[in-house]
Image: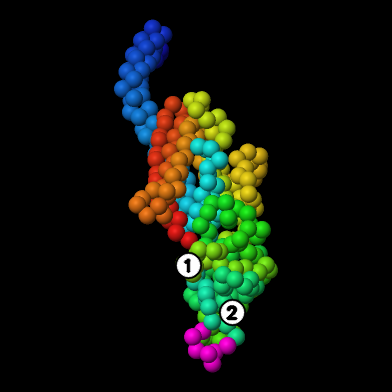
Amino acid sequence: MTKRFPKQRGFSLVELIIVMVLIGAIGGIIAMQIKPTVQGYLAVGKRAGLTDQADSALRRIVTEVRSAVPNSLRLGNAQCLELVPSSDGGRYRAGPDVDPARTGETFLDFDTPTNEFDVLTTFMAAPRPGDLVVVGNQNNSDVYQGVTGPNVRTIQQVATPAPASWMGEHRVTLLEPLTIPNGYTGGRFVVVPGGQAVSYICTQGLNDGTGTGQLVRVVRPIAPGQVCNGIPANAPVLASKVERCEITYSPNQGATQQSGFMQMQLTLTDGGESVSLTIGAHVNNVP
């Protein structure tokens, strides 16, 4: 007896091809609808990353500009800003105590060079041997002469506290003798860590539409001449993908001629997306 099976039927090759064509067409339509959204999402992500990078770099620069030694900012060109950073400061004793019974204090004056002086205020960040003391930096060129100039000396030792409480909070010993610069009556000094100057330099691939430039921070010993080239290979990079960089500095803004103004514009480019940020900072040039 023969057993009969129901007739089985599958898809034909033509039917499979038709289904594949329909699925491809539907997928293409969906992709065309989604593509602008995906591209927009990726573009927003790129711009957000560029904005964050530029903002962080500019804020870092402004922070250091505002704490720089007065009258120490200088421009080698629109892509090269140099300053002398400060880590702390205070008021120095500018004369003997009014009580004749009190003796032994040390102070700075205009006529007699001295290697020691008492500090009347407390340090927030204690200076170290090798740091510099800058007193009354009224001219841009003074601080960049270093210890050969009239108002910069090297710290040998900081005694905390001073030998007697009435003398002050600290006693600073210098490697070189110092007098108060002529004409300066502010009674303040600032501390430069390690005797170093800082430069912010934009370099490589600027203004060519590729966004291959860099903004770097270069630390060098204080020197009379400003150096905007020969960037060390290990210099920290604050921003990459730099397309445009322009720094301006005007040292004498305001009615009192004591407040400068620094402005920096930074444009970053990546994959056809560009972001431009501008930041400005008032610079207190009162020593």
Depth order, front residue of 129/97: 97
Who's the residue at 57% across and 83% down the image?
Answer: 105
Residue 256 rendering spot, x and y as whole percentages:
37, 54
Residue 96 percent across, percent down from the top left: 54, 82
User: Which amino acid, by three-letter code, is at mark 1?
Assistant: Thr
Q: Is residue 227 magenta?
A: no
Task: Assign a secondary structure to mark 1.
Answer: loop
Q: Quadrant of residue 32?
A: top left
Q: Which residues are magenta?
A: 97-103
Q: Residue at x 36, y 50 (%)?
A: 254
Check the image and name the residue furthest to the top.
14
Instruction: For label 1, count other residues whose C-alpha is less than 10 Å away and answer few (under 14), some (14-19) or many (20+).
Output: few
Which residue: 40% across, 35% down? 276
Q: Position of residue 207 (x, y in %)?
A: 50, 28
Dominant SS of magenta comes to loop
- Could you say which is closer to the camera, residue 101 or residue 126? 101
Whether 264 is drawn above or below 95: the answer is above
Name the residue carrying label 1: 185
Does label 1 or label 2 sit earlier along the sequence?
2
Which label is found at residue 19? none
Q: Is residue 156 rendered to the left or right of residue 161?
A: right
Task: Note whether residue 150 is visible.
Answer: yes
Q: Is residue 36 left or right of residue 138?
A: left
Q: Is residue 160 visible?
A: no
The CA distance from mark 1 to mark 2 is 18 Å
Q: Residue at x 58, y 88 (%)?
A: 103
Secondary structure at badge 2 equals: loop
Instruction: Please tell me whether residue 100 belongs to the stretch shown in magenta.
Output: yes
How packed mark 2 is, by other alpha carbons closer than 10 Å (few <14, some 14-19, many 20 or more), is many
Locate the N terminus by quadrant.
top left
At label 2, the amino acid type is Thr
